[in-house]
Amino acid sequence: MMKLALATLFLFAGLSGAAVAQSLTYGVTLGNVQAVRDINRNVSTITGSLANQSGRAISSALLTFVLYDAQGNEVGRVDDDVVGTMAPGQIRLIKAVTPLQFTKVTVLNIRAQ
């Protein structure tokens, strides 16, 4: 059982480690995107680091991730709200949870205000 969990972890880490940013708010970056499947709870957790590299505070951000199967077909989308002010230079950890099974994740959009 532990071997299966570790294999799943490495599969998602390898396949989803590089998120492709399609649309980013100026001065906001997202890095270290990873996805891990918890077979006991039957959910996947997408994590990463959101950084405010602009010269102004951001009051909130909404991230939209697109999930794909092994054939490259979209299987769904999941959002993560980052609530609370982010000062210039501040980094926040993001976390989105979904029951959908996927092999690749990309960032579709980050809206910050």
Image (cartoon, helix red, strand yellow):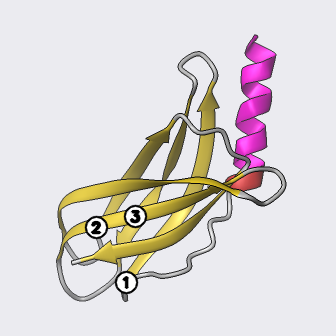
Question: Which numbered disc, 1 or 2, marks the residue that appears first in the sequence?
Answer: 1
Position of 2 with respect to 101 (left or right) is right
Percent of width and height locating residue 75: 64, 51
- Residue that badge 3 annotates: 63
Report helix, strand or loop for mark 1: loop
Q: Which residues are magenta?
A: 1-14
Q: Are marks 1 and 2 in contact (CB under 8 Å)?
A: yes
- Residue that badge 1 annotates: 25
Residue at 54 percent across and 67 percent down: it is 107
- Residue that badge 2 annotates: 61
Q: Are marks 1 and 3 in contact (CB under 8 Å)?
A: no
Position of 62 with respect to 3 (left or right) is left
Name the amino acid, label 1: Thr
Question: Which numbered disc, 1 or 3, marks the residue that appears first in the sequence?
Answer: 1
Which quadrant of the figure contains the C terminus?
bottom left
SS assignment for the magenta stretch, majority: helix
Name the amino acid, label 3: Leu
